[in-house]
Amino acid sequence: MGKKEDNIKKAKNLMNKLSQIRNIGIAAHIDHGKTTLSDNLLAGCGMMSEELAGKQLVLDYDEQEQDRGITINTASASMVHDFEGKEYLVNLLDTPGHVDFGGDVTRAMRAVDGCIVVVCAVEGAMPQTETVIRQALREKVKPILFINKVDRLINELRVTPDEMQQRFVKIINKFNELLKRSVPEEFKGKWVVKVEDGTVAFGSAFHNWAISAPYMQKSGLSFKDIYDHCNKNDQKTLAKKSPIHEVLLDMVVDHLPSPAIAQKYRIPHIWRGDENSDRGKAMMATSENGPLMLMITKIIIDPHAGEVAVGRMYSGKIERGQELYVAGMPKINRVQQVNLMVGADRIPVDYVSAGNIVAATGIRDAIAGSTVSDDPEVEPFERIVHVSEPVVTVAVEAKNMKDLPKLIEVLRVISKADPSITVDINQETGENLMSGMGELHLEITEYRIRKEQGVDIVTSEPIVVYRESVGKQSPQKFEGKSPNKHNRFYIISEPLSDDIAKALYDNEIPQNVKKFKNEAVKKLQELGMEKDLAKGVFGVRGLNILADTTKGIQYLFETRELIKEAFDEVMKSGPTANEPCQGLLVKLVDAKLHEDAIHRGPAQVIPAVRNAIYGSITISNPTILEPMQKVFISTPQELMGDVSRELNQRRAVIRDMQTERDMVNIDAKAPVAEMFGFASAIRSATGGRVLWNTENMGFEPLPRNLQTEVVKQIRERKGLKPEPYPASYYMD
């Protein structure tokens, strides 16, 4: 029996031993060596040949990833590791480092309890490193540190052993400083990484060796030995004496929590249901005999098996033929196959129990982020908060009309598999809009539609998604009349405080205010909202709030749902440019309603409220918000002039500049709209000698002098009159 088959058998046997399971992720800045590391871990456990490890990139199994040399999909793999005489099952999720795929990282973090953060010894902690640490801590995932590419310090940069240690100290201090910023209260001081306790390892994933303090004691290797081996270019011996998979998996087993420990503090954080219910207790105890609770974190499209849903089992067990529900969907889904993932292989098993990662087919309604259970009415897991949202859009059309039905199906499947891509299919205009995190994200998705799904498509130039808001409170209340003139609603709009908008974005205020009334009111008051106003809040849509500040108006309670519907409609597309609204507090301050219910149905109330909200925004200094990006550039000093010229042409603001030896590190921010084509422009301006990357940083008001022109362009593109309607238009 081969080592791989043997491993599969062991993995099946370990699935129920909770204290011997570790669910981990590997996360890092782009090109710091995550995938090479994952490969070597798999090879060490006999899941692929050792010679090919690091070159084969098992987890980058789609050709697009191998062409571009970057990881796009989070793949998962299970392996078995011996530690101090006991066998452990390690479920590993490899994640992408490129900012455009940040959504994938966030989703992977939901499924794991610990993660290895990889930092390159040469480059040190980069912006994306900070983001992944923040993402991990936001999901209460415990991070440990691996400093990679140590051989390059010795062989390329020729540093002395002393300089090398200083570099390590600097990276470790920076890591701990980032950790302290976002670590949950209960783990302050407990999750700090230190060389001496073995929560930090050093090594080279490419050359397959690593070392940590505990392993030095175990193997008798000293720091000097390692330095000498690298210096003599004899890293093969090092890999035999101190193999990377042994060192890192020892570190994982020793320092990262098992599901039984982690679920006790993670469940209250990711699930708003009642902890004392059977379901709550079963998840806290990671019980395989409890009701089934599964969180889907990824959908893989397999040409043979169709959609494969990968996710984390929090309680119960999932087996073939079982009938399950996806929260929020009416239909029953029947499970066809249950698998463990081993590299690119799926191994069918009879069932998968709580605390493990499963890959199942047949759960048709699931998308990444869905809650799957045996009860249609279950309280779902918290929605996954993404660090950034889709800000770039392209219109997608089929080249041949006959492919249109297939294109619509493919777009649906794609938005299921990658929720960071949003698809808006407009049956009337025949225009299909696809929005993503950035140019690269959309390029790769287009490639997939053409290559993998075989649909020939034409795409428009990328356009930017804006948001609408207001600059001040409405000077007076705005009246909206119903078509039959029997009902009147009076609305005031004003900017929402930044603290409350941020809390909405971070999911700290429940979207379903009706169900979690007390929790929402308490949180809003903590953030500085007056008590009466907070109690009147009855609708949340995106980063906007609807509140009722009226007193004693008859029949109002019965029309509340209709008022909320009208509010939702306006928040989806505002009056200035039909773009989504953000950061608005809409207050209903008065209303006059007809006593007869027949005269205040949906056809009367919705248009009246809609006009009142539109009108109140129009008189409150309507503002357009544009998406911004942080831009980090590392350039040789002599090219500094070319780089700043390139940035100045793009309305960029330089926030900080630091010089290190002969390199300058620039930290700037620029509008996404101005950053199209930046990649090729900067490459040709500097002969490709500049390292750069970007990260989305939310929305900021568009400069006033550009607003009229931008609004006109958006409206004309959408086939609307170039000028927004004046307030008087909404008064009739």
Image (cartoon, rainbow, N blue to C red):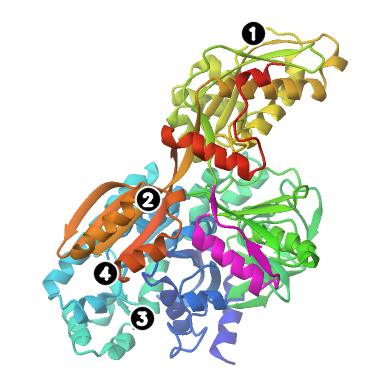
Vertical arrangement, residue 217 with respect to residue 626, above or below: below
Residue at label 4?
Answer: 121
| Type of the residue with mark 4 | Ala
Camera-nearest residue between 177 and 719: 719
Q: Quadrant of the N terminus?
A: bottom right
Whether residue 719 is visible: yes
Q: Earlier in the sequence, mark 1 or mark 3?
A: 3
Q: Earlier in the sequence, mark 4 or mark 1?
A: 4
In the image, residue 491 lies at what x, y percent? 62, 17
Q: Quadrant of the C terminus?
A: top right
What is the secondary structure assignment of the residue under circle 3?
loop
Task: Give residue 272's quadrant in the image.
Answer: top right
Vertical arrangement, residue 685 with respect to residue 13, above or below: above
Residue 446 is inside the magenta segment: yes
Q: Which mark is residue 551?
A: 1
What is the secondary structure assignment of the residue under circle 2?
loop
Q: Is residue 168 left or right of residue 282?
A: left
Frontmost of labels 3 and 2 is: 2
Circle 3: is it few (<14), some (14-19), or many (20+) Cα within 10 Å? Answer: some
Q: CA distance from mark 4 to mark 1?
A: 63 Å
Frontmost of labels 1 and 2 is: 2
Q: CA distance from mark 1 to mark 3?
A: 69 Å
Whether residue 373 is visible: no
Frontmost of labels 2 and 4 is: 2
Q: Earlier in the sequence, mark 1 or mark 2?
A: 1
Q: Earlier in the sequence, mark 3 or mark 4?
A: 4
- Identify the magenta region: 437-464
Q: Is residue 4 left or right of residue 318?
A: left
